[in-house]
Amino acid sequence: MNIKSFFTVAALVAVNCAFGQTLEKMNWFNEPSEWNINNSTLSMFVTPKSDYWRISHYGFTVDDAPFYYAEYGGEFEAKVKIKGDYKVRFDQAGLMLRIDHENYIKTGIEFVDGKYNLSTVVSHTTSDWSVIALDRPVEYIWIKAVRRLDAVEIFYSFDDKEYHMMRNAWMAANCPMKIGMFAACPDGDGFNVTFSDFSVKHLPDATRTKWLEQNQE
């Protein structure tokens, strides 16, 4: 390899390292019929009559809504900007953190009774649901999730600057997790949603970091 070729390869490696995970490299679970990626923005038409829920209160289990993800281990900070054309009851879109079909978190905006709600569902065999009603419609929102050890802290923001916590949930530590963008339309005939500025940032393992600090040479 001559010196010019060497530097060309090195530059390509540097670019890949700098940009890391891209939307084009991610995977579909329940791929919708209509979707597009353009300028680092994922757009989709949400599959009608689709959702994620397990058993409690309603008595049924569904696992059939679109979810676009990449898989990560360890601790992380995930963030995305969401904009949706919500129309009918339970239209929803946001972040999903998923270990398997029995253990997952979905969190974002959910349209209920004509109001926008910050919504989080945590499932461990059965699902629970928490909401924070907003006093006005919002054009878009940022959702951020931080996984540390066996806890996931979930935050929301209207400007990507000031974040507020909306949930702290248990999720098993030290196992891979699928992280990405989901949307569901349990009642309606589908709606359009866009996701932008999606990122997952690796966080150094807290337990290992503590051990290294206590066992310096």
Image (cartoon, grey):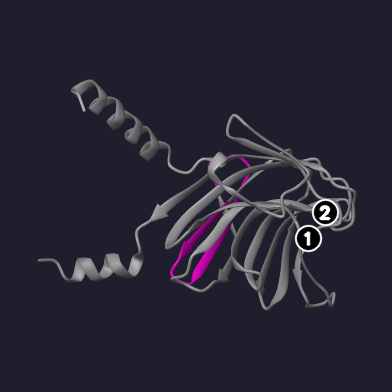
Dominant secondary structure of the residues highlighted in magenta in the image: strand
Q: Is residue 158 visible?
A: yes
Number of residues whose C-alpha sits closer than 10 Å to that of mark 2, classed few (under 14), some (14–19) or many (20 or more): many
Report x, y in % for residue 192: 79, 40
Q: Position of residue 30 (x, y in %)?
A: 72, 55
At x 71%, y 73%, the residue is 127
The residue located at (48%, 54%) in the rendering is 77
Nearest the eye: 8 or 171: 8
Whether residue 195 is situated above or below residue 68 in the rendered picture: above
Question: At x 85% / y 51%, what residue is drawn?
Answer: 48
Q: Residues within 10 Å of mark 1 (few under 14, many from 20)?
A: many
Stretch of the chain drawn in magenta: 144-162
What element does badge 2 sit on? loop
Quarter the N terminus occupies: top left
Q: Please tell me which residue lies in front, 142 or 31.
A: 31
- The reply to whether discs 2 and 1 touch (Cβ–Cβ < 8 Å) is yes
Which residue has dot 2 on it?
A: 185
Q: Is residue 137 above or below residue 107?
A: above
**Number of numbered discs present?**
2
Residue 200 at what x, y percent from top left? 49, 49
* Callout 2 amino acid: Cys
> What quarter of the picture does the C terminus occupy?
bottom left
x and y, in percent, of residue 114 in the image? 88, 51
Query: Real-space Cα distance between discs 2 and 1?
Result: 6 Å
Residue 90 - label: none
> Is residue 122 highlighted in magenta?
no
* Residue 155 covered by magenta stretch: yes
Amino acid marked by disc 1: Asp
